[in-house]
Amino acid sequence: MYSRREFLRTGLHTYTLVALAPTVPGFLAQTARAVEPMRDGRILVVIQLNGGNDGINTVVPFADEGYARNRKVLRLPTDRLHKITREIGLHPAMGDAAKLVEDGRLAIVQGVGYPNPNRSHFKSMAIWHTANVNLPKEDALGAQTNASFGWIGRALDEGRRPVDGSPAAQFVGSGSMPQALRSKRSVASAIKRPEDAVLTLKESADSTLRTRAVHGEDLASFVRRSTLDAYGTSERMARVLRAEDSGLSYPATELAGRLRVLARLIKGGGGTRVFYTSQDYYDTHYDQLQIHASLLRELSGGLKAFLDDLAAARLAERAVILCFSEFGRRVRENGSQGTDHGTAGPVFLAGPGVRSGLAGDAPKLLDLQDGDLKMSVDFRRVYASVLEDWLGLPSKSSLGGEFAKLSIFRS
Amino acid sequence: MSAQKSDWDPHGWWIPYTSGDEAPWNLRRVVHLHLRAGFAATWDELQRDLRDGAARSIDRLLKGQARAGVPDKFRSVTETLAARAAADPAWLKAWWVYQMYAGPDPLGERLTLVWHNHFATSYDKVDDTEHMRRQNEIFRNHGRGPFGELLNAVVHDPALLIWLDAPANRRGNPNENLGRELMELFTLGVGHYTEADVKESARALTGWKVAQGAFRNWGPDHDSGEKTILGRTGRWNGDDLVEMLLRHPATSNRLAWRLCEWLMGEKSVAAAGIDALAAGLRHNDLNIGWAVETILRSQLFFAEKNMSNRVLGPVEYLIGLPRALECFDPQPSSLVLGEWTERLGQQLFYPPNVGGWRGGREWLTTQGIVGRANYAAALVEGRLWTRPIRFDGIALAKKHYRGRDLQDVLTFYAELLTGVPPEVAWRERLLAGLGPKAKLEPSTVRAAIALIAASPETQLA
């Protein structure tokens, strides 16, 4: 263990590897600007379901004649569903989600989609991320234009930056920054694992953090700014990791693991307003039953564990979780015990701040358009509600228009 | 290659580069060539190319002769790694990393990386190292010829077929996955086909299966009925579909776009330039090697505004840094480097989805940026080797008659990695990071190298 003087000497003047590990002296943890979690600071957590979740087998309209007609192998037995009403039940693997509905912590918006549905994963996801149903043709080499910012990014740009220098948005997962978080001014951070976001070479931070704030959209400025932001996030990450993890037990799944990291970050304080993660493998063209059950169990269990964890830390009232997918799937099952790309699907909103239960109209499986579900709720209405009624951010310019809000939050 | 504008390029987008006052053949352009078309080069390789001029240097890259020293045992080590890969995806990554690091053909390996991204297939679902390795070999062996040969090889190969559910696609029970991605991602691109085309393509592709680890065209499962695809009606099968897609002009355009995305930086080629390249491809049987050569030899490629305007990719950074620092004897562990591809955000054989990695600015997540800094620190501290060997940065500089003081060391390593000495502001930041008492001594030089490698300036390739 170092004395304070020794640490300063080795850290600044002689090159050594200073891994910011939990054995670092306590005084360092105190000198970091401790910020109380803002009492009224509301948080949005987004879980993106990648691949196109089969809404029909998630929020099951079991009483609809079309269900039995179109789903043979994939038809879920009515008696195993978790009934929400006399006509709608949740997939058998979603027991935890059903509990959340019962104790007032889960809202389900049915039939969410957009006009002229697009069945390409990438295009449809881009529509959800940008809230732009008329996607501009991409510039040949992907230039950054205003149209390429995300619905959350644009909304955050209209709010205030977190005072403690935290990123306004934090993505935790593999892969690149979701387009939804891309913005002009706000800082968003993307990490896979907190440990990997910690710098081993302290001099890197000292050297780079001396640069002044960098503006400009050109590549060089972008790289400089991203580096500054990354090193800043790294310091914060290191602090969070040093703090004890008092989390309740979570299921041993990948998604639950990531939600646990998000919970630690939230409990660690700081002004980040939006957290974003994802869950893969919903693109069930083939042999759907087992994988879909497994995914929904993971999602359902993760949601409950996360909310219970925050509740134990008395932070649950501050958070709402939004779960969405880029499209639903076709009503009629295909020949491979699976389903192909479809249109509208359910969106989940979880947390004590929501009005629990079903919203929107249940999709009618016999009243279709080109073999697919008609939408009953434009997704931008969900976004408008989340931005204005939950986060207190204006939605008109983020969404490129005004969309009638839904009554999904208690206050 | 004629210096005149060609039939396919009447506006001269791709006229050849000649060294002159406006675009001199200097160290910066040599480094630019290697970072774009290969991996970072050693100081000797850079000086050699500087002396020999652009044409010779590009020749060498195109012919797989650009590397000064390839280990004698290269082939046998590669085969040993392939055998180990059969049991373990970690060794599969090591097998490819080794070829990128020690092999004779960096441009070929970069092309392999491009096709791995274009036909993005993940081990996660395929779950068979031999299938993944075979697909990678297809990218390596067919990656520079006519695109039709590459495409046909890839779609008749188990890995892609399994990845896109082809075996489940049967007469009467179509599965659209392969048909859709074939049109959307591998050939035409969005906007050039309809949903009806996707459905009909799925029918055309019925019967394509995998049996005993190889492609099998299973007649009984094939829907041989009439189909209308892209406006043409006939009893199309999978091979007919592929042929139709290859002949469609949108495919040449997408191919041109893909190659420019690889070799050119942000905002460096207008749509008209890509169209011209696409026209040239159509005149040349969609020959990938022709297009790559045309790009590399062009004035546009070496234009001032087209340098330092592309983000160095994670794998490029990973392979390039220790190579530029001449870490050959011994090499860092390919297994360890393979694991680092994940931490840097481009895990080989595990693209995030069938669309691949979008790359560019998206490489620079917090994880990616911190990862690069930590990689550089690990390298200089010797932790990329099975037995730690700290890097001797003074010895390397002195070997090339540089490094008489700390300032010159900074200049040398900046020139090695970026082609130019550090600008004043950068130099000041580096010195500030090293501290006021910094001297020309091994630990300081190691820190300096790690800082230079991790600097924003070095990520602009």
Image (cartoon, coloured by chain):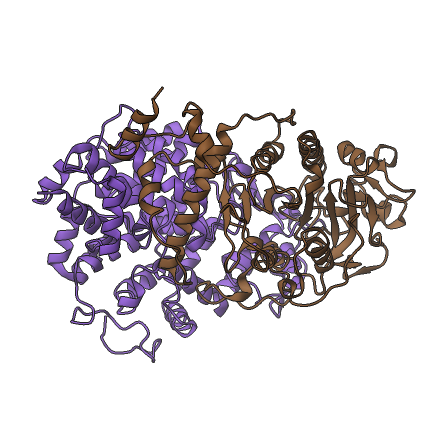
Q: Colour of chain B?
A: purple
Residue placed most toward the observer, B237 or B326 = B326
Q: Is residue B227 visible?
A: no
The single residue placed furthest to the bottom in the displayed view is B10
Side (left or right) of A14 relative to B460? left
Q: Is residue B433 left or right of residue A70?
A: left
The mark tally for this picture is 0
Above or below: residue A47 compared with residue A159: above
Asked whether the viewer can see residue A202, the reply is: yes
* Residue A57 spot, x, y in % from top left: 77, 43
User: Residue placed at 67% from the left, 36% from the top?
Assistant: A315
Q: Which of these two is toward me, B207 or B194?
A: B194
Residue for point 50% across, 60% down: A184
Q: Position of residue B25 (x, y in %)?
A: 17, 63
Please name the color used to draw chain A: brown
* Residue lying furthest top: A1
B145 or B214: nearer the viewer? B145
In the picture, which quadrant includes the C terminus of chain B?
bottom left
Q: Residue furthest right?
A: A86
Say which residue appears at 29% left-offset and 25% top-offset: A6
Residue A355, percent from left and from top: 81, 46
Q: Residue A294 sits in which quadrant?
A: top right
Q: Quick one: B6 or B238, which is closer to the camera? A: B6
Point out the image quarter for the N terminus of chain B. bottom left
Q: How far across and how far down the image is residue A2, in percent?
A: 34, 22
